[in-house]
Amino acid sequence: MSELYLLLSATLTGMSLIGLFRTDDLLRRVLALNVLASAVFLLLVSLAQTPYGLDPLPHAMVLTGIVVAVSTTAAVLALAVQAHDRRRGEDP
Amino acid sequence: MSALTLGFDLLLVVGLSWLAWQALFDPHRFSAVVHFMAFGLLMALVWVRLDAIDIALAEAAIGAGVTGALLLAALGRLPATAGHAPAWRVGQRPLVHLALVTTLMSTLALAWVAWQLPRPGLAGPIGEALPESGVTNAVTAVLLNLRAWDTLLEIAVMLAAVCLVWSLGPALTPYAPATALPGLPALTRLLHPLFLLVPAYLLWRGSHAPGGAFPAGAVLGAGGVLLVLAGAVPWMHDPRRQPLLRLLLTAGVLLFLGVALSGLLLTGTFLDIPVGMAGTVILAVEVAAALSIALMLMALYLYGEPGR
């Protein structure tokens, strides 16, 4: 069953890489990075299902990863928004 | 039964692929963001299917909720650009095809490698160390005792992100939906007890079942963003309350550091919690970390420093 999700994670990785490089819009790049992060998390958690039971270590890593991902998203978006506001303030 | 679950899995996989495609390549930015939020909700279902309830709780609150709110707030402020890059020049075409083929090949290679990767896992060693960690939920034990160093650094990274965002300038005034939607403040007030009750419950059960600081902080932060949107937390912008706000923001990191240093004093190892008091210490760190995570999520949503 988890093999299905491994394939999904590979597909999402490829799709988000194409999306990341294909666009010149910052917001879309942030979206693509978020999808890429989800794909990596999916890979980690799918691999956590071992023959010896559920491995809690990848789960803990993904939990911290989700919080770091939202912090990065917020930092990048704040940079983009504030830069846009400055530029608009300089040449009206 | 297994045919039913296989069908459900297939449905999830197809749905997620389609939603990701829409989020990445939809020509309208707003619809791309909404598809991404739906993607986050479906991801939460996938985490449930993969027996990762802790991640499902955090993803539903952060992936779909807070990230979506951040993206929507930025969407209104960034100018609408063409979305996609201009058409390729003739000389670029072979390069583009080459890049596409490379991405496709690496996707296939990744799928192949992931398919047959050995899975030794650390389930055994962690299970052996569990009785000495002070909690019975393995994920909480890893997060706050066995690999507490990672969690400490993770909260520090989040604090650094807040510092970066606040250093950019004064907080942007959120668009006031209160004037257009008089129901929102009332609804927020009605819902807020739930946003306090659910994290408290998640925090408490984190020691023995899925839950703990991260899902609790995420749910509390999502409720907090709703409060910020409704303009119901004026004290965050009050210059006199800034020291208190900063203290609460850093509480998680400070308490964690204090625990780590007292571990160094008591046992001689950084971040080593003595077995007898591990349960109490973990609960205290969890409460501080959840509060800090929730406040930091709200602080990030301001897109700048309040009270300036």
Image (cartoon, coloured by chain):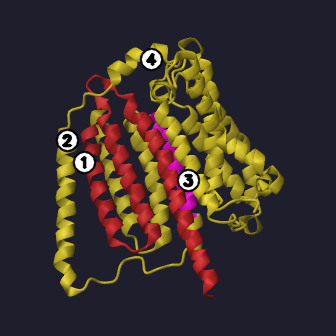
Chain colours: A red, B yellow
2 or 3: mark nearer the eye: 3
Residue under the image location 62 percent in, 29 percent down: B258
Which residue in the protein does label 4 denote? B130
Which residue in the protein does label 3 denote? B161
Q: Nearer the viewer, residue B104 or B5?
A: B104
Q: Residues within 10 Å of mark 1 (few under 14, many from 20)?
A: many
Which residue in the protein does label 2 denote? B115
3 or 1: mark nearer the eye: 3
Q: Earlier in the sequence, mark 3 or mark 4?
A: 4
Q: Earlier in the sequence, mark 2 or mark 3?
A: 2
4 or 1: mark nearer the eye: 4
Query: Chain ID for label 4?
Result: B
Image x and y of residue B181, in percent: 73, 65
Magenta span of residues: B53-72
Image x and y of residue B33, in percent: 48, 64
**Residue A7: assigned label:** 1
User: B101 above or below A40?
Assistant: below
User: B204 above or below B100?
Assistant: above
Quick check: marks 2 and 1 in contact, CB under 8 Å?
A: yes
User: B192 above or below B142?
Assistant: below
Looking at the rendered structure, whether the residues under marks 3 and 1 are on a common chain is answered as no
Residue under the image location 46 percent in, 13 percent down: B131
Looking at the rendered structure, whether the residues under marks 2 and 3 are on a common chain is answered as yes
* SS at badge 3: helix
Magenta run includes residue B58? yes
Q: Quadrant of residue B172?
A: bottom right
Looking at the figure, which quarter contains the C terminus of chain A?
bottom right
